[in-house]
Amino acid sequence: MFEQLFPNVQVDDMITATNETLFMTFFSVLGTFIFGLLLGLLLYLTGPGGIWQNKIANWITAAFVNVFRAIPFIILILLLFPFTDFLVGTIRGPSAALPALIIGGAPFYARLVEIALKEVDKGVIEAAKAMGAKYRTIIFKVLLPESTPALISGLTVTAIALISYTAVAGVIGAGGLGDFAYFYGFQRNSFDVVFVCTVLIVIIVFVFQFIGDFASRKLDKR
């Protein structure tokens, strides 16, 4: 039945493409979480009223975030070819897509982190300061725990954006379902391949959304 409906779909090749998409998504989400969290903390802490308030540092961080958020992802990949080649040793394959995915995703997540941190009750922060808490304690014992549900929700949104980015990266040879849909589906007029790739990407998005929503609800103490 499956072969009759999708005659051009090779299951083994589709599994390989799916694994490549999952590889790119997992490691890009991990890298985006780390660098995006650091950038978001810098934006918040050096901003007006932050415990490290510094106009110059905040302007530099905000400029970096805004510039890389403004660049379309397909152009960002091309701009980063020399850096990717230096870092990874190639500009093709799933690993080669990771620098662009992380650099494209981290600034986006950083703004969501900043928003999440701004939602933390100022009274809780002031109470921690009044008790003589150090900056490190305020960050790791107050700010991050209080904003965890919002941080996870933001990461879920970012992860879904990164899944779509992997499809774009596939068009220029990064592998994954985007690569498979374009080169083995669209270019060969095998639209059953394009359809199956689309369905698999949608399933991956739904799984990430479910995991993110579940984790956010579990950690929300309100």
Image (cartoon, rainbow, N blue to C red):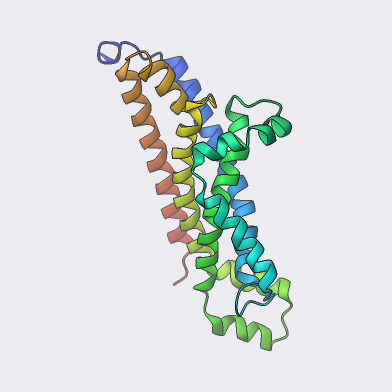
Residue 18 in view here: no
Q: In the figure, is residue 84 to the left or right of 155?
A: right
Residue 8 spot, x, y in % from top left? 34, 11
Percent position of residue 136, x then y: 72, 71
Question: The C terminus lies in which quarter of the figure?
Answer: bottom left
Name which residue lies at 35% across and 30% down: 198
Residue 166 is situated, as x and y percent measured from the top left of the image, at 49, 35
What residue appears at the point 56 percent right and 50 percent down from the top-left corner?
Answer: 68
Tell me if residue 166 comes above or below residue 106 in the rendering: above
Tag count in the figure?
A: 0
With 54 as the anchor, is 13 left or right in this view?
left
Can residue 6 be seen here?
A: yes
Residue in the image at 46% along x and 57% along y = 153
Q: Nearer the viewer, residue 191 or 146?
A: 191
Provide residue 112's location: percent of width, then percent of height. Answer: 50, 60
- Residue drawn at (30%, 19%) of the image: 191
- 200 left or right of 102 in image: left
Q: Quadrant of the N terminus?
A: top left
